[in-house]
Image (tube, grey):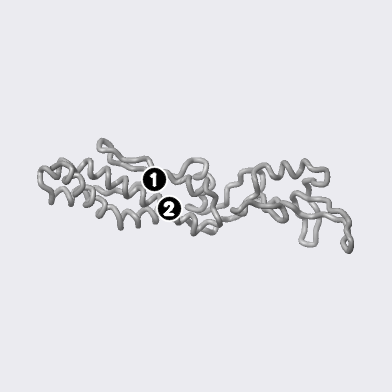
Amino acid sequence: MFTLSVRSDIRSVSRALSDLARKQLPFATAQAINATAARVKEAEQENMRKVLDAPTPFTVNSVAVKKATRANPVALVYVKPVAAAYLLPYEIGGTNKLNSHALLKPISAKVNQYGNLPRNLVKRLTGKPNVFVGKIQTKAGLVDGVWQRTKKTRGKRAGLKLMVKFEDAHVVKQRLDYRGVGKRVLAATFRAELDRAVAKALASAR
């Protein structure tokens, strides 16, 4: 979590306001903060789509906002805990987080539209009599994964087909720069949102 302050903008606006407008400032400030937080959320989601390889809706929609109020003019743009756990290396570096004992890399198994294995696919595959989990010596070395025994067909011998390969965690190269995105949106957005919110609050107060 990181903090971005807009106190200097609020003080600057406050000095130029009349007494009536200054009374409306707390409400307008909360409105401006929330509008800016919504912009930050959208920017973070769009950045995820650019940086990550076909992120799922679950990942993109993990960015959420806790709104500010007049009494507590602080908005929180955050990533929900489950997604934050596996997205953290894309912010600070390190190896990708594994949800199991190994990274499951689809080889000939069908994947969904996001390039991921459907939930419980490995369990369903290994429930078939011609599929097993194990390590097989290949030309490329020892390969651990889910294998399917194939039948002999015309012009093709019976053998083994790798469905899913088990790999170790690897170093993450992409960077989301969550903090940088938030700072840039705040700098470009908040003051205009505050001016707009003050004008709207004054119009309604007259």
Q: Label 1: which residue?
A: 77
Residue pictured at 77% horizontal, 59% vertical: 141
**Quarter location, residue 204:** top left
The percent coordinates of residue 153 (x first, y second) are 88, 58
Judge whether 66 appears above or below 39 on screen. Answer: above
Outermost left residue: 19
On-image quarter of the C terminus? top left
Query: Are discs 2 and 1 less than 8 Å apart at CB?
Result: yes
Residue pictured at 71% horizontal, 44% vertical: 122
The percent coordinates of residue 22 (x first, y second) are 14, 44
Residue pictured at 72% horizontal, 41% vertical: 123
Q: Amino acid at mark 2?
A: Glu
* Position of residue 38 in the picture relative to residue 130 (left or right): left
Q: Nearer the viewer, residue 78 or 94?
A: 78
Using the image, tell me which numbered label, if any, was put on residue 44: 2
Using the image, tell me which numbered label, if any, was put on residue 140: none
First in sequence, mark 2 or 1: give its number: 2
On-image quarter of the N terminus? top left
The percent coordinates of residue 52 (x first, y second) are 53, 56
